[in-house]
Structure formats: C-alpha cells, structure tokens
Image: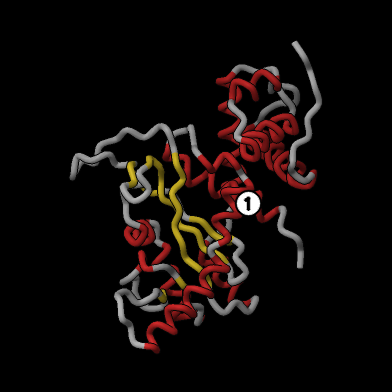
Amino acid sequence: MITYSATLDVPADTTTLLTDLLIAERRRRGTGIGARATTARTQAILVLRWFREDTGMPTLARDTGISPATGYRYLHEGIDVLADRAPDLHSALEQGKAAGWSHVVLDGTLIRTDRCRVNNPESGHDLWYSGKHRAHGGIVQVICDPDGFPVAVSDVQPGSMHDLAAARATGFLGALHAAAALLGLPALADKGYDGAGIGVHTPAKGAHLAPSTACRNRLLTRLRAEGERGIALLKTRWRALHRIRLCPQRIGAIVAAALVLTSAERPIR
C-alpha cells in the first residue's frame, strides 16, 4: 500500500467554520470529549472532501479510519449544521434592498441524482425524472444578486415539476411578490417563469416582436445573464452537486450547505 499527502482546495477559514459548527453541535447533543471516533476537525475535512471533490464514502471512511456507516452519519451531520446557517429568503431580500440592489435574478436548476425511482401517484410517471433534461434529479430555485452571487436557495422539488410550479411550491414566488410590492425590488427570470405574477419580469414570447418588446427582451437577457452565473458558481465549486448519490430528498439541504460554504469564501468588499 502506498501512502501520500494531498492538498484540499478549500480555505483554512472554511475548515475552521465547519469545525466550530460541529463542535457546537456535539455540545448541543451532549457528546462527551473523546466519545466520537474522530475529532470535529477530521469530520469537517471528511465533509469538505465530499463537497469539493465528490470523493466516495468508501475512500473517505478508509482515510478517516471509520466504517462507511459512521462516515455517512458524519456526512449528514455536517450537511445539516451547514444548511441550518443558510440565509432566509425574506432576510436576504431585505438586506439586498438595504445594500442598494436594483433587482435579483430567479433561476432553477436540476441537481442530478441516482437514487430516485418513485412513481407519481397522479400520472404514474417517474416523479424524479425531468423530461426537459432527460435525467433524474431534483429542482432547486436559486436567487442571485445583480453581481451573480447566490444569496438564497429553495428546498428541493421532484425533477418532473416545472420551474414555475416548483417556485410556487417552495414559497419563493410569494416572497418575490412581497419584495416587489413592499421593497421595490423586482426579480428577473427566463421564459420558463412566464405568468409568475407581478414583480417577476420575464421576456415576451413569440416571433416578429415589436421593436420595443424585442429591445426589452434583450435588456432583460443581458441583466439576467450576469445573475445566472450563481448556479454555475455553486456547481463548479462543489463537485458533489454534479450528481447526488444520497436520497433525493436531501438535495435541498445539500445545496443550502453549499451556499453557506460559498458565502464563507466570498471576498469581503
């Protein structure tokens, strides 16, 4: 067997943040010192390796000196303590208005997954299969600021659900309507959100549009393009989001945890 050293592409401050959260969680549970198979820092590194490199649990468990079952338990605990720190959408919108945002960008993304063979009780079709993407997964709504940084994410909805229906089901549309009416903070979205309601601006559909309408479409597209980089930022930074091999119901918490990790690495302006 050959041993070697490796470097994890994650700032030390991020590891310290997760370690502190895990220590607080162990104290909350009343876990005694030395009662766990690993230290909180070792557990934090396991969780970060999973997020950053999508390392398989057999490898993580072997490197940490624990069983795969214990490794999965530690991983889920790390996901939960991070997800609990994810910003609330209403608070994020209020803070954005105070910061001078002109708008926010709403977009949905499919997080692919392996484990989702559930029939829709109404249609009989595979509930977690997205015909649009031709893949299994869960739909997550992401709100980005005008600079394209993700500031809030929704809980997961089955992949067969349309983006607009998913936004309604998660309560994101209600929050955006309130932000537009009370804060004067509109949201920009693509054509998939057509009919979302007041305060959510989408491009007009159809061909041979009037010059004024075509100009509005181009303006919305250019403003939205900057904001849509937030999803790419999450998925490219944290490789675990490429394909989730856990229960699909956990996708919402995983994306929320990734948002917290991304925010922790954002440079202070």
Q: Is residue 269 visible?
A: yes
Residue at 78 percent across and 47 percent down: it is 13
Residue 110: image location, x then y, percent: 43, 49
Please indicate whether residue 154 sits to the left or right of residue 78 in the image.
left
Please indicate whether residue 28 sits to the left or right of residue 242 in the image.
right
Residue 29: image location, x then y, percent: 62, 33
Residue at 70 percent across and 22 percent down: it is 64
The number of discs equals 1
Q: Which residue has dot 1 on it?
A: 260
Colouring mode (rainbow / by chain / secondary structure / one colour): secondary structure
Q: Quadrant of the C terminus?
A: bottom right
Q: Nearer the viewer, residue 17 or 227?
A: 227
Residue 111: image location, x then y, percent: 46, 45
The furthest residue to the front: 208
Q: Quadrant of the N terminus?
A: top right
Q: Nearer the viewer, residue 229 or 177?
A: 229
Q: Nearer the viewer, residue 101 or 74?
A: 101
What's under tag 1, amino acid-wise? Val
Q: Is residue 16 above or below residue 75?
A: below
Q: Is residue 91 visible?
A: no
Residue at 35 percent across and 44 percent down: it is 134
Which structural element holds mark 1?
A: helix
The furthest residue to the top: 1
Residue 163: image location, x then y, percent: 36, 58
| Location of residue 263 (image quadrant) | bottom right
Residue at 51 percent across and 45 percent down: it is 253
Badge 1: residue crowd in 10 Å (few <14, some 14–19, many ≥20): many
